[in-house]
């Protein structure tokens, strides 16, 4: 089992909380770096979101 599979199984049922945490952490890093790495942070947040799959509050996604 890969590390990604292990993480997905640990997060199962807690996707929304994980998304909020990732967004909060990314925003904090963005503030600390003065927006210098905003594109990379946004890209990492998007990839994380894609790996988690559909959102409960967005059935069309």
Image: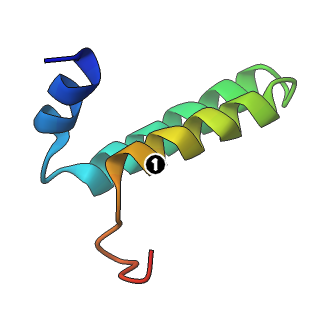
Looking at the image, the residue that sits furthest to the front is 1
Q: Which residue in the protein does label 1 denote? A: 49
What is the quadrant of the N terminus in the image?
A: top left
Q: Quadrant of residue 39?
A: top right
Query: If the image is split into quadrants, where does the C terminus sit?
Result: bottom left
Q: Residue at x 85, y 26 (%)?
A: 34
Q: Residue furthest bottom?
A: 60
Q: As displayed, is residue 42 above or below residue 4?
A: below
Q: Mark 1: few, some, or many residues within 10 Å (few <14, many ≥20)?
A: some
How many numbered discs sit on the rendered protein? 1
In the rendered image, residue 48, in percent from the top left (x then y), is placed at: 46, 39
Nearer the observer, 54 or 33 = 54
Image spot of residue 44 (x, y percent): 59, 33
**Corner quadrant of residue 51:** top left
Q: Position of residue 40 (x, y in %)?
A: 73, 29
**Residue 46 or residue 21, whichever sits in front:** 46
x 35%, y 77%: residue: 57
Q: Position of residue 28 (x, y in %)?
A: 61, 31
In the picture provided, is 47 more to the left or to the right than 19?
Answer: right
């Amino acid at each position: 089992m890969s590390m990604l599979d292990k993480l997905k199984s640990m997060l199962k049922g807690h996707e929304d909380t994980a998304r909020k945490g990732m967004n909060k952490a990314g925003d904090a890093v963005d503030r600390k770096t003065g927006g210098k790495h905003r594109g990379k942070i946004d890209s990492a947040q998007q990839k994380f979101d894609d790996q988690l799959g559909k959102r409960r509050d967005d059935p069309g996604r």
